[in-house]
Amino acid sequence: MGLRTRRLGTRGNSKYHYYGIRLKPDSPLNRLQEDTQYMAMRQQPMHQKPRYRPAQKTDSLGDSGSHSGLHSTPEQTMAVQSQHHQQYIDVSHVFPEFPAPDLGSFLLQDGVTLHDVKALQLVYRRHCEATVDVVMNLQFHYIEKLWLSFWNSKASSSDGPTSLPASDEDPEGAVLPKDKLISLCQCDPILRWMRSCDHILYQALVEILIPDVLRPVPSTLTQAIRNFAKSLEGWLTNAMSDFPQQVIQTKVGVVSAFAQTLRRYTSLNHLAQAARAVLQNTSQINQMLSDLNRVDFANVQEQASWVCQCEVSVVQRLEQDFKLTLQQQSSLDQWASWLDSVVTQVLKQHAGSPSFPKAARQFLLKWSFYSSMVIRDLTLRSAASFGSFHLIRLLYDEYMFYLVEHRVAEATGETPIAVMGEFNDLASLSLTLLDKDDMGDEQRGSEAGPDARSLGEPLVKRERSDPNHSLQGI
């Protein structure tokens, strides 16, 4: 029968029981058990009952055809899922126009004419429009084919247009051969123009895929976007393997910034969805407010004042506004509006100034430092709502970074991808502005009074050493 004994309990105080007891296969009790399960199923509501379908016979062609119709192919499943996900993206986004390349007095290389430059403008615009169409249809796997077909074209300039996936054929377009593309990309003005076009393209793709970073998005779409971002650099590097290293670095630098932006925005969206549950829980909000009132903000201000050197009135006002917003059990959208108002209030006095990017960076550092000090105090006090505060802190820090990123982009006339991306020495307007900002600080150091210092500007200026100073002294 397979019966065994098993001892339970500690030694000296143990009991034995039989292990493996079960009904015999021919026992009438089995019938009683089946009747009990049937009656329990009859008492379930209609929408909870499992549906049973008769088995399909596959011994004829007609039956096998009807049976195969019950199972959808992976392509059909992906198409249905893409149609469902398109309601979460911005399919009505208007793709901006590209600027014209500024050749100036640059002398083109041998074999490269102005007609080739015009052809590149037309072909590259059509290529970018095809990329936008593919992303709008959420057919991310076509991007690799698009890049391979564009950067490895074997056709001559006299051939007809090449059809690209998800793109209408342009009768006026021409496909540039690979050697002509390499020659054009080796021209610095052309490479700078292509980089600025890429900034516009990838910023448009970000706004299409993630039009609202706080809006709930299905996890399947989020994962698809993250997988897409993970593959971008490898796809482009493989497609441009025969191009000069400088061209590859320039192109991959922008794609890397695009991929990083997608990862940050999807992470921000994930944090927002997790935080909604916390902000909608009344008991958690009350516990957070109780723990926050125990924080010694005077001690926090005393420790942070030497590092941040912020105005006490500004810090106290932010503290009171935060507690009031938490006490009102505000929604996530209301919290987002409050964070936006904080950024506007702090950076308002730097609007239109070359010091705006630096003031924005200083504000992010100080915001992060103060929030870490508050989290530290909650940790030392073993606050019951520490987990909720940690989640909220991660979300608010990331969203504050998102807001400042867009404010700096608006102030500098660049796209957010261009502001936060990796730049090289070819075209870096943001880095140029930062250098001018640092030089301007030295020139304005003696002119600025105590009233000019604020939350965004440090009181202590770091001394800069001139490498030629000792030689000049000699």
Image (cartoon, grey):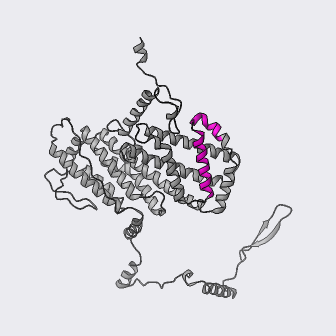
In the picture, measured across the screen, residue 383 lies left or right of residue 93, that is right
- Nearer to the camera, 57 or 342: 342
- Who's the residue at 41% across and 35% down the image? 434
Residue at figure coordinates x 23%, y 43% from the top left = 101
Query: How many discs mark residues in the rendered view?
Result: 0
Tell me, yes or no, whether the highlighted magenta stretch contains residue 314: yes
**In this rendering, does residue 243 appear at all?**
no
Secondary structure mostly seen in magenta is helix
Q: Nearer the viewer, residue 6 or 439?
A: 439
x, y percent for residue 58: 40, 83
Residue 377 visible at all: yes
Query: Foreground: 448 or 108?
Result: 448
**Which quarter of the figure is the N terminus placed in?**
bottom right
Q: Look at 35% across and 54% down and name the residue there.
A: 204
Q: Is residue 464 left or right of residue 42?
A: left
Q: Is residue 14 left or right of residue 110?
A: right
**What's the magenta region?**
300-327
